[in-house]
Amino acid sequence: MAEEEIGIGVIGFGGFAMFAVQQFLQVPGVRLKGMAGTHREAAYRAAERYGVTIEEVETMLAREDVNLVYIATPPFLHYPQGMQALQAGKHVIVEKPIALTLEQAKEMASLAREKNLLLVVNLMQRYNPLYDAMKRLIEEKPLGELLHAYFENYATDEGLPREHWFWDKEKSGGIFIEHGVHFFDMFEGWLGGGDIVCAQSTLRPGTKIEEQVQCTARYRDGITVNIYHGFHQPERMDRQEMRFLFERGDVTLFEWVPTRLRMHAIAGEKDMRTVCEIFPGGRVNVLQLYHGKDRVCSGRHKAMDVYQKFEYFWGDENVKMTIYGDLLRSMLLDQLAWLEDRSHRRKITEENGIRSLEMAIKAKMRSQTEFGNE
């Protein structure tokens, strides 16, 4: 595949698909060959810009110059269109979630393996350098053991009118499935497999709109993670926060694609060096220095030797869209490397889509059981 042109066909062409395709086409050798499944005015203008026509899905899938299909339609279409593309012998990248049920997801994965084709969900968060840095922080333990974490998503609904498919669980799967899979996948990457302990959902008063969901997941060593998604904010107030509580401090990541962090902790000299190696080029604010016997403290019945309390700032909130584009290109490059050499170990495979969907379905079902929501 490295020596050949990669022809992409896109099914669905909303605002995010337009952004994603612009990133994909910056990968050397990748060309847009076809568009289908869209009737947006912006899509027709984009087709004119790229020199392609908008076709029926069946027509585009029959084209020999289309090697890889990117599916960016609403979630209820991912399974039928994914199966259709795989049966046509095309590699598939599909937006999250992979499907609406586990049975559908596993059937897609089985067909892809049978035909030796690529199937991957665009769970691009694992390509973020900050994701890898947090994994090192958890594993190398300069702040001690991780005890607890949470993610809170105060998301906008300003671009989601009442008639939008997002609010229809038959089409979106609900918030846990449509949106939560990103974060179930991230925490699995950091902590291994987990399970849902409890979950709740809240309907907007006077409507059947599910606007808020939250759950608690438990991972190894009893680590609990609270996850909240609420779609109720004006766009200018859309914001996200992810916090990790360690034995000797806490770390907060900002934005749903994390771009920056704030650390508030205590450390000895060796641990401070490790922090600076993991997050190079950060800014340190020393809050307090300790000397002599004052260096000794304890927590969880463990003695600690620390020389300072500090804040550490890393990252830049102004590069969010730049990082977002980097993640999409990195995801595609990783998948194309696998097509060239099947021994290549990808960061994301079809299994990520299946496992994240499984966690999302458990959370959805638990919230319905506990509160009787339909």
Image: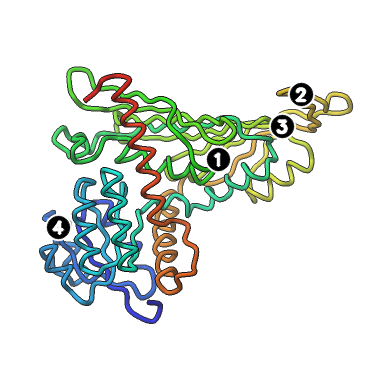
For the question of whether residue 193 can be seen, the reply is yes
Residues at marks 2 and 3, CA–CA distance in whole angstroms: 11 Å
| Mark sitting on residue 312 | none
Q: Which residue is drawn at 16% across and 71% down?
A: 62
Asked if the residues shown at circle 4 and circle 2 are in contact, with their CB atoms under 8 angstroms apart, the answer is no
The residue at the far right in this view is: 292
The earlier-in-sequence mark between 3 and 1 is 1
Residue under pointer 1: 261
Mark 3 residue element: strand
x, y percent for residue 121? 35, 54
| Mark sitting on residue 298 | 2
Q: Given the image, on which type of amino acid does mark 4 rest? A: Gly
Question: Badge 1: few (under 14), some or many (20 or more) residues near its Cα, within 10 Å?
Answer: many
Q: Which residue is drawn at 32% across and 74% down?
A: 6
Mark 2 residue element: strand
Q: Which of marks 3 and 4 is in front?
A: 4
The earlier-in-sequence mark between 1 and 2 is 1
Q: Nearer the viewer, mark 4 or mark 1?
A: 4
Residue under pointer 3: 266
Q: Which of marks 1 and 2 is in front?
A: 2
Classify 102 as above or below 330: above
The earlier-in-sequence mark between 4 and 2 is 4
The earlier-in-sequence mark between 3 and 4 is 4
Asked if the residues shown at circle 2 and circle 3 are in contact, with their CB atoms under 8 angstroms apart, the answer is no
Residue under pointer 4: 37
Q: How many labels does the image show?
A: 4
x, y percent for residue 171? 19, 41
Q: Given the image, on which type of amino acid does mark 1 rest? A: Leu
Q: Given the image, on which type of amino acid does mark 3 rest? A: Ile
